[in-house]
Image (cartoon, rainbow, N blue to C red):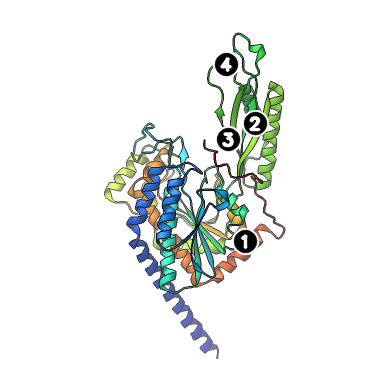
Amino acid sequence: MNKIFYYSSFILAFAFLSLNALAKEDVDKIIDKHQSKFEKTALDIWDFAELGYQEYKSSNLLKEQLESEGFSIKSNIADIPTAFIAEYGKGAPVIAILGEFDALPGIAQSASPFKESYKDNTAGHACGHHMFGAGSAWASVAIKEWLEVNNQSGTIRFYGTPAEEGGSGKVYMAREGSFDDVDVVLHWHPGSVNHASPRTSNANKSAKFRFKGISAHAAGAPDKGRSALDGVESMNMMVNLMREHIPQESRIHYVITKGGLAPNVIPDEAEVYYYVRHPKEKFVEELFNRVIKAAEGAALGTDTQMSYEVMHGNYSLMPNDALQKIMHKELSELGGISYTKEENEYAKQLHGTLLDPKSKVGDQENISPYRPRHGYGSTDVGDVSWLVPTAGARIATWVPGTPAHSWQAVAAGGTTIGLKGTKLASQVLARTAIAIYLDPSIAEDAKDELKDRVGKNFNYFPLLGNRKPPLDYRN
C-alpha cells in the first residue's frame, strides 16, 4: 500500500512539474509575441516624462493597451485622475501587478552616455518607471492570454499607480480599499543588479513647512520686516543639530523650495520641503514630531508664522518569503542579461562616468544570491505589503553600478539595455503569477506568513492621515 502511495505521489509530482514547465514555455512565447508593442510603450512613456499626478499621456497609453487586449478598466481610483485598475478573468486567486509611470523633476532627459545640459524637458525617468509600467502591463497581458488559452480560473489585475515619487499614490488606493480582495501582489523595479530577495525599506513621511513674515526694504527699513527665510534657515539649523540625537538608521533631508527673489527685499514667504525616514513607522512619527517642534521654535525665534502640509507617508516594505522564493526561482531559471557588442561599448562609456561604482560591466549577467536586504529609500509599495502578501524583484535595466535618480539611469533606460531588462522583468512576473495559479496553496502560505509578521494586533492607519491626494504637489 505504501509503495502504491509513493508511486502515485511521484507520478502526480512529475505531472505537475511537466505542466509547470509547459506553462513557462507558453508564457515566454506570448511575451515574445508582444515584445515590439511594449518596448515601444516603454519608450513612449520615457519620451512623455510626466511628473507625479500629471501622467495623463502615460496613464492613458497603458489603459488603451490593456483595454485593447480585453481588460476591463476602472479609472479615477481614489479620486486620482491618472490611477486605474485593469482586470481580466474571474475567480481566485486574484493576483495584482503594480505599474508605475511617473518621472522625476530636475533631470535631463537624454540617452547619451555623457551628461547633457537641460534641453526642453523639465523631468526625466531617473527611476525607470517608464519600464516599470510597460513591463508590468506586458506581463499582465501575457498572463491574461495564458489564462484564456488554458481555460484557467483566476483573476489578473494591473494597478496603474501614479506619483510613487513623493506622492504616495498607492497609499490613497490602499486607504480606499482597492486591494481588499487581492490575494497576492507582484511588482518589480528597475535597477543595476538582478535579485528577487526578501527586502525591507525605510518608512517615511514628508511635509512642506511654510513661513510667513513681513516684507520690507532690506537696507532702508530692515527693522520693519520679518524674514520668512530666516524662519526656514533657523528651522534647518535646529534640525541639523538634532541629527546628533536621532537613531543612526534615520534619514532626514530637505530642499528650500521658496526663499525670495531679490536680496534687497525681505522675503515675506518661504518654504522648505522635508523627508523623514526610519525603518520603523513609529520612529518616523516620533522624528517627524521633533521636526515640527523645530519649525515651531524657528517661527517663535524669528517672529514669523509657520504652517505645514503633510505631503506623503509610506510604510516600510514587508518581506514575504513564501512568495519571494518562487520569484527568485523563476529569475534564477531565466538568468541575467547579456549585452551585444554595441551595448557593451555604450555600457563601458556610461560606467566610466560613475563615481566609485561597486559593480562592473558584466555583472548584469548574474543573479544575486537569495538573502534578506534593506534599502534606505522608501516606496508606497510598503503600505500595500502590510495589507496583502507582496513580492518584488530588482532587474538590471541600468548599467551595473548606476545609482537610481541619476542622469545615467535616465540614459540607459532610453536604450535597448533598459528594454532587455524590461522583458526579463515581464517574464519573471508572468512566470511567478502562473506558478501561483497552478498551485494556489502558495497564496495561502503567503497570507499566513503576512499575518505572523504584522502581528494579530496590527491595525493599518496611513502615515499621511486623512488628507486628500496632493494632485498639485509637483506644481
Q: Amino acid at mark 2?
A: Val
Task: Please determine whether, in this image, residue 286 is positioned above or below residue 324.
Answer: above
Find disc 3 in the rendering and name its residue. 253
Find disc 4 in the rendering and name its residue. 265
Mark 1–mark 2 Cα distance, whole angstroms, equals 36 Å
Q: Nearer the viewer, mark 4 or mark 2?
A: 4
Quadrant of image for the N terminus? bottom right
Where residue 200 sits in the image (x, y, percent)? 57, 51
- Local secondary structure at mark 2: helix
Find disc 1 in the rendering and name its residue. 450
Left or right of 43 on screen, residue 102: right
Which residue is found at the position 48% from the left and 81% from the top?
12
Quarter holding residue 31:
bottom left
Q: Amino acid at mark 4?
A: Val
Q: Please say whether residue 128 is visible from this viewpoint.
A: no
In the displayed orientation, state which residue is furthest to the left: 341
Quarter holding residue 330:
bottom left
Find disc 2 in the rendering and name its residue. 239
Mark 2–mark 3 Cα distance, whole angstroms, equals 10 Å
Mark 3–mark 4 Cα distance, whole angstroms, equals 28 Å
